Each structure stands twice: as C-alpha cells, then as structure tokens.
Image: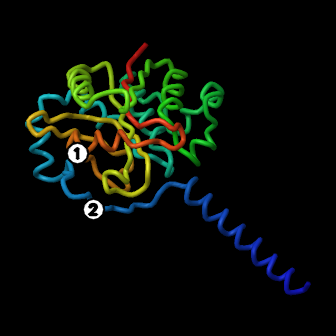
Amino acid sequence: MKVLNTLLKIALGSAALLSVGAYAYLFTPPSPDPTSLPKGMVSLYSAAGQRLLRTSHYQQDYESIKQYFVGQERRAYCGVASSVIALNALAKRPRYTQQTLFDDATDKIVPAWRVALNGLTLDELEGILAAKNARANTFYAEDEGRDQFRQKMKTILTEDNDYLLVNYSRQTLGQEWVGHISPIAAYNEAEDKVLVFDVTDYQYPPTWIDVDVLWVAMLAKDIQSNKSRGYLIVSNT
C-alpha cells in the first residue's frame, strides 16, 4: 500500500508538472525560434523576395498589412492576430489588440480560452469578424477551384477595402504544426507566387509561396470542422 501511495503521488506530481508545462506553452508568448523555410519558398527579406515584390502588379494591400501587422501572441492565436490585422487595416487605425478582440459577443461564438487551446475554424473566424461589424465571406477549397482563388485574389489585391486571409495546413507545406491562418499581402502573377505575411513571425518571415503548393495545403482537412481549409475575404459592412 505504501508503494502504491508513493507511485500515486509521483503520478499526480507528474500530471501537475505536465499541466503547468502545457499552460506555459499555450498561454504565454512564444520565444523566438527562427526556422528554415522549406525548399521553393522565398523569404520577403531575401534579394529574390524583394524582386518578387518589385515586379508584382497585385500588392494594394501590402502597405496596410505591413503597417498594421502583429505577430501572434500565443501558439494558437494565428486567427486572432490575422483578424486584428484585417480589422485595423479596414479601420485605418489600431482599433483592436489580441486582448481586446474578445468580448461578450465573441464569447458566444467561441470563448477566448478555447481559442488559446484549439485556434479557430473558418466558421468561428467568420463569426468573430462579423461580431466586430466586418463582412467576412468564407470559401472552402474543396468547393472552389484554384483559378477562382487566383481571380478573387487578384481583385482583392487591386482594391483597398478588403483583405484576404488564408487557412492552410503547415504540414502539407513541410513546416511545423498543423493548421495556420495568415493574411496575403501580394501576388506575383508572372511567377504565380503569393506573399503570405506569416503571423508566426517568431518563427517564419513573410514568405512567397507557389499558388499550386498553397492550394494543396488549403485543400487539407481541418479535423475540428471536418471540412477542408480555405480562405476568407474580409471587408467593411
């Protein structure tokens, strides 16, 4: 019995330590952890990345996203950070932070604590943006074609009153973690690459990705929603 009690205390102590570790991992700001980009992806900060930007004819949203960019403050806050960027860019002023985004209206859609644990599905992200009086239209990759995506992206990136947020599988791209959400800031049609302004800025820079490669990552299933990933178009109501 004494041995069993000792083992039980050890087990409970280990569980407590794991809980504390999990809390620290999910609920505290991530530490800088620069990671190499997979082959074929191009950092905006490289000479090639700057050339792609200079020769892009679709970059209307670039300056606004750059001005209002915020990196995610928690591991699962990619949708939160992307929402803050889009909402502040639409307002042309810093209206929200990753703390003030949540209120009674958003908690009815998904509570903040659950977002910190699981992130956001596209439906939940659309609901939060609507609660902030923005118009958000969700498009699932499984219901779309990549040519439709290209055309909508080109239209958005020549206007200044709407923004594009993409939801894709990191694993499909050869990166770490599973699902991710970030805004698109530019498109280079000649090389068919999009500039994803990655909100995981402690790990990845703004990155040029082939549309075909990104589209496959957007087709990946989100196990929380049981639907494919995709994108949102965010505009003022």
Of the residues tagged 1 and 2, which is closer to the observer? 1
Q: How many marks overall?
A: 2
- In primary-sequence order, the first of circles 1 and 2 is 2
Q: Is 165 placed left or right of 52 in the picture? A: right
Colour option used? rainbow
- Given the image, on which type of amino acid does mark 1 rest? Ile
User: Crowding near pointer 2: few (<14 within 10 Å), some, many (20+)?
Assistant: few
Query: Element under label 1?
Result: strand
| Residue linked to disc 1 | 209
Question: Looking at the picture, which amino acid does disc 2 mark?
Answer: Ser
Name the residue that disc number 2 marks. Answer: 36
Q: Quadrant of the C terminus?
A: top left
Coordinates of residue 194 in the picture (x, y in percent): 22, 38
Residue found at x 60% / y 28%: 106
| Horizontal arrangement in the rendering, residue 213 relative to residue 84 (left or right) | left
Rendered residue at 34%/51% (across/down): 172
Q: Is residue 96 above or below residue 75?
A: above
Q: Position of residue 33 (x, y in %)?
A: 38, 62
Q: Secondary structure at mark 2?
A: loop
Q: Position of residue 134 (x, y in %)?
A: 45, 19
Residue 171, percent from left and from top:
37, 54
Measure the C-alpha gap from mark 1 to mark 2: 14 Å
Q: Is residue 69 above or below residue 172?
A: above
Relative placement, left or right, of 223 versus 174 is right
